[in-house]
Amino acid sequence: MAKDDAAPSPGSAPWRGADPFVYRDRDFYVFLGVRFLSAAAAQILSVAVGWQIYAIARTPLALGLVGLSQFIPMFLLTLPAGDIVDRRDQRHIYALSLAVSAGCAILFVLLSDMKIARTEPFYLVLVLLGAGRGFAGPAGSSLLPFLVPFERLPKAIGWSSSVFQTAVIAGPALGGILYVVGPVAAYGTCVLCFSAAALGVTSLGGRRRSTQHNRQISAYERVTEGVRFVRSRPVVLGAISLDLFAVLLGGAVALLPAYARDILHVGPLGLGMLRSAPALGAALMAIGFGRWPLQRLAGKAMFAAVAVFGLATILFGLSTSFYLSLAALFVLGGADMVSVFIRTSLIQMATPDAMRGRVSAVNMLFIGASNELGEFESGLTASWWGTVPAVVVGGVGTLVVAALWMWGFPKLRQVDRLSEVVPKD
């Protein structure tokens, strides 16, 4: 019998389940490694692409188009991808999506080596990257409940989030260092990380869902089932939409290349530090959740975190001090992680196995809209009003959204324990 399949022993990892033939320690560890490598690569790529495109175009709108280029394919593909994930092994889909990301990084290597001085080829590759992410989101986010026992899921989410945020800390800083060496070095590292993550996914075991599906309904009906599921649960809908509009308006991170170059006057290394600051705050908060999961007042904590996120965004927008900006981004990241942890836990615990892919797709569509479309919104408003007013107005808008959602989704505000949302059937 393999070591991973041995019977549980005292002091073993807390996520080992009652059935060791289903839940293996190594699968959770490999999943954490995949999360780290893929997230670090995505951050390195984001720093390199953002700096390179802004150096070519020198306009905030060019940074906004980085987000829009990725959002359009994600918008078109994420919901159908969720249906495919629910009918296929999400491990295969996730691995293929990471391979597509590796391919995009190779294309960026070629563009940089050829010293292309136009932005259009970069945007075309970003469209392909967004298509891969459209499948990677539902596949990756729906996988964890099949690798750990249900009773350990909140703690596993906390550790997964902490590993992800650690990568988001290290990735931008490493991206800044690598970009000083050259963009080819930055993109080449992304190729290695995405490829290793894809190989790691192919080795994952864990529980499999039932292969029986209702074949009497069309693909369109299957996709809309996920949307109807979210709409029928005010707590889940409120949590997802709150994150959408809060981050959509408060997307200061999208304009960091402009802040680094034109306002704070720091180079690629400074940009890497600015990108790492919110991730550091988020990572520390995620480590806390991994060790001490949130027990009470989940709904109120989520709204308070969104309000702090908005205030920190305003402070960052007004700051002309590099260190004050780092502090504001640190607080912003910690507050965002509180919201992310609660939202993720609510969705994972409220969703039955048969719907995980499609519900994750709805969630990822909202996240993509808040992040990538938020980048476009930030770049567009910055080109209209200026960089600083765009960030400040976005922070104020986040506070307004938090107040409106507290009034419009009282059931979300009243959630106490996360276990309250577990389906009774």
Image (tube, helix red, strand yellow):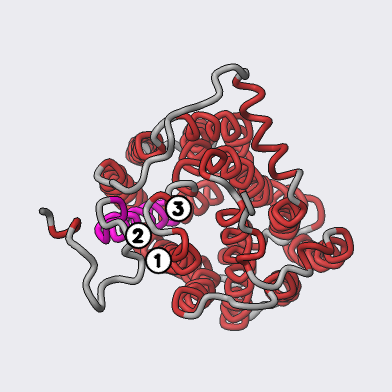
Mark earlier in primary sequence (2, 1): 2
Cα distance between the residues tagged 3 and 2: 13 Å
Q: Nearer the viewer, residue 142 or 272?
A: 142
Give the labeled residue for mark 2: 32
Picture disc at residue 145: 3
What amino acid type is highlighted by mark number 2?
Leu
Q: Total number of numbered labels?
A: 3
Where 347 sits versus 98, above or below?
below
Determine the residue positioned at 68% across, 30% down.
224
Badge 3: residue crowd in 10 Å (few <14, some 14–19, many ≥20): many
Magenta highlight on residue 27: yes
Cα distance between the residues tagged 3 and 1: 17 Å
Image-quadrant location for residue 405: bottom right
Q: Position of residue 182 (x, y in %)?
A: 33, 53
Q: Nearer the viewer, residue 273 or 321?
A: 273
Circle 3 or circle 1, nearest the eye: 3
Judged from the image, the secondary structure of the residue bearing numbered disc 1 is: helix
Q: Position of residue 216 (x, y in %)?
A: 59, 17
Mark earlier in primary sequence (3, 2): 2
Residue contact at pointers 2 and 1, CB within 8 angstroms: yes
Cα distance between the residues tagged 2 and 1: 7 Å
Determine the residue positioned at 69% across, 41% down.
229
Judged from the image, the secondary structure of the residue bearing numbered disc 3 is: helix
Judged from the image, the secondary structure of the residue bearing numbered disc 2 is: helix
Picture disc at residue 163: 1
Q: Which residues are magenta?
A: 22-43
Where 412 sits versus 312, above or below?
above
Residue contact at pointers 3 and 1, CB within 8 angstroms: no
Q: Position of residue 140 (x, y in %)?
A: 44, 46
Determine the residue positioned at 36% across, 59% down.
36
Determine the residue positioned at 81% across, 56% down.
385
